[in-house]
């Protein structure tokens, strides 16, 4: 990868992380070889010989989306108002069974552009055809953790046996090992969609080659019934017994967690992807975010698939997380804006096992978002804590002006530099018409 020349970015406000005291007004970020070399208050910045750019506004770490099935932009808006099991089995699966790698690549490219335009610079994806996901993301310049899928269901027999799917994950991981924007992990769909044998095969895979293990956990109240009947265990306890809860496990949703489940996640160092907008759309429930974070569990925010949300909007995700946390206990002191911002940035990076993401500190990836403060919505852009609260409560994708990933600019003045969005949208439209047509 060719890196841009070393560049100093000056902004009216630089937010280096979610901690108190991390808003520097005015501030500076120095970028060398795709990494942050220095960041902080402009008045304390070291001497600089290279290029310098004044961007005004506020410069933030890019948002990290920890749970997504982005190619579901192909299925967006379908099955509105159906109970989740009917939505899944009668609307999603019949269409998904017909997906080709070309569908996934085209949809990922459009979804990647949408995320970049919304300020998301990293996504953690679980979906079919992992190579096409990586290719679609890289074409847009989006950073992507591809958790290659593993599923056993009659509709998806064409994806191969468990052994074949595991072999394909190993190959995919080897193929992308040196790419700066891509990391490959494993994405077993869920305990209820996989046999014990398949889950044991996953443990053997990650024992031999530690990697991110991304799995749906306790999303709906009844989904653990089969596991409970067969084993007497909740899904988190079952995963723990199989050795699948580790410091690189990411459980998506984790809405229906018992005290013991939370304790197991905390003891093993497993992380959680909290997806409040999706949980609301599907009436899944409200995850116990405060209890999980108090136990020391890393919790990041995820959009889930765009057919379950239906936006890829980190600002709405932060606000919804706060609203659910507060209204569930009628306490306005729950989940403050700073914490929600962290769950969308630095804590999300940690949930993925990636301390180099979600923060503008020396050594971190130069994944950055410039937000306009001279437009209705965020003006007047007061500094310090009030700026952070304003970004969380009033921010929106429309205020995202410029975006960089690995130091390379991918959005300028609200336009995507890497994807021709109009033609990408036309292509996705045509492909989704084909998928929605009744089988002939
Ligand atoms: Zn999901």
Image: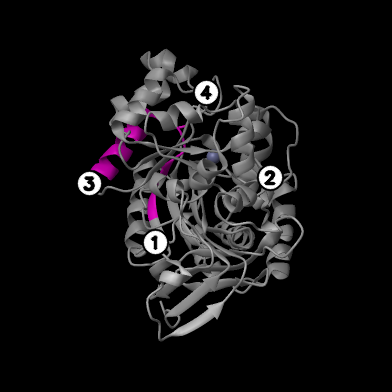
> Which quadrant does the N terminus fall into?
bottom left
Residue 363 position, x and y percent, is 34, 64
Secondary structure category for the residue under label 2: loop
Residue at the image position 68 percent from the left and 34 percent from the top: 281
Disc 2 vs disc 3: which is toward the camera?
2
Residue at the image position 41 percent from the left and 24 percent from the top: 235
Secondary structure category for the residue under label 4: loop
Q: Earlier in the sequence, mark 4 or mark 3?
A: 3
Return the mark for residue 361: 1
Return the mark for residue 208: 3
* Residue 351 lies in quadrant: top left
Where does label 2 land, which residue? 310
Secondary structure category for the residue under label 1: loop
- Left or right of 440? Residue 407 is left
Q: Earlier in the sequence, mark 1 or mark 4?
A: 4
* Callout 3 crowding tier (Cα within 10 Å): few <14, some 14–19, many ≥20: few
Q: Nearer the viewer, residue 158 or 370?
A: 370
Where does label 4 land, which residue? 223
Tell me if residue 138 comes above or below residue 64 in the rendering.
below
Q: Earlier in the sequence, mark 2 or mark 3?
A: 3
């Amino acid at each position: 990868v060719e890196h841009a020349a070393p560049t100093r970015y000056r902004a009216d406000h630089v937010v280096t992380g979610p901690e108190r005291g991390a808003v520097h007004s005015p501030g500076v970020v120095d970028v060398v070889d795709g990494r942050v070399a220095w960041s902080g208050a402009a008045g304390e910045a070291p001497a600089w010989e290279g290029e310098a750019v004044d961007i005004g506004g506020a410069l933030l770490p890019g948002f990290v989306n920890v749970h997504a099935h982005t190619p579901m932009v192909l299925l967006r808006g379908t099955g509105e108002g159906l109970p989740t099991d009917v939505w899944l089995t009668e609307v999603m699966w019949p269409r998904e069974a017909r997906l080709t790698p070309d569908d996934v690549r085209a949809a990922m490219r459009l979804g990647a552009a949408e995320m970049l335009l919304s300020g998301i610079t990293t996504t953690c994806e679980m979906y079919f055809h992992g190579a096409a996901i990586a290719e679609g993301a890289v074409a847009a310049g989006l950073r992507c953790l591809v958790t290659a899928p593993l599923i056993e269901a009659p509709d998806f027999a064409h994806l191969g046996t468990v052994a074949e799917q595991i072999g394909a994950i190993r190959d995919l991981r080897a193929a992308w090992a040196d790419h700066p924007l891509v990391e490959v992990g494993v994405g077993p769909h869920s305990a209820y969609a996989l046999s014990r044998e398949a889950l044991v095969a996953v443990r053997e895979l990650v024992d031999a080659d530690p990697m991110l293990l991304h799995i749906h956990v306790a999303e709906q109240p009844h989904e653990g019934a089969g596991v409970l009947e067969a084993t007497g265990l909740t899904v988190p306890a079952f995963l723990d017994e199989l050795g699948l809860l580790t410091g690189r496990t990411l459980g998506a949703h984790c809405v229906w967690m018992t005290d013991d489940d939370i304790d197991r996640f905390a003891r093993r160092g497993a992380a959680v992807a909290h997806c409040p907008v999706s949980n609301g759309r599907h009436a899944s429930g409200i995850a116990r975010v405060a209890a999980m974070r108090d136990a020391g569990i890393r919790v990041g925010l995820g959009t889930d698939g765009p057919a379950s949300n239906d936006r890829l909007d980190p600002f709405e995700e932060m606000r919804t997380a706060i609203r659910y946390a507060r209204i569930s206990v009628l306490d306005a002191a729950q989940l403050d804006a700073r914490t929600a911002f962290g769950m969308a940035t630095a804590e999300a990076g940690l949930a993925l096992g990636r301390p180099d993401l979600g923060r503008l500190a020396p050594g971190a990836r130069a994944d950055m978002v410039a937000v306009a403060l001279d437009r209705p919505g965020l003006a007047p852009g007061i500094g310090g804590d009030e700026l952070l609260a304003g970004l969380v409560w009033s921010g929106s994708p429309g205020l995202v002006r410029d975006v960089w990933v690995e130091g390379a600019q991918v959005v300028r003045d609200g336009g995507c530099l890497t994807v021709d969005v109009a033609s990408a949208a036309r292509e996705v439209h045509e492909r989704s018409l084909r998928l929605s047509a009744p089988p002939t």
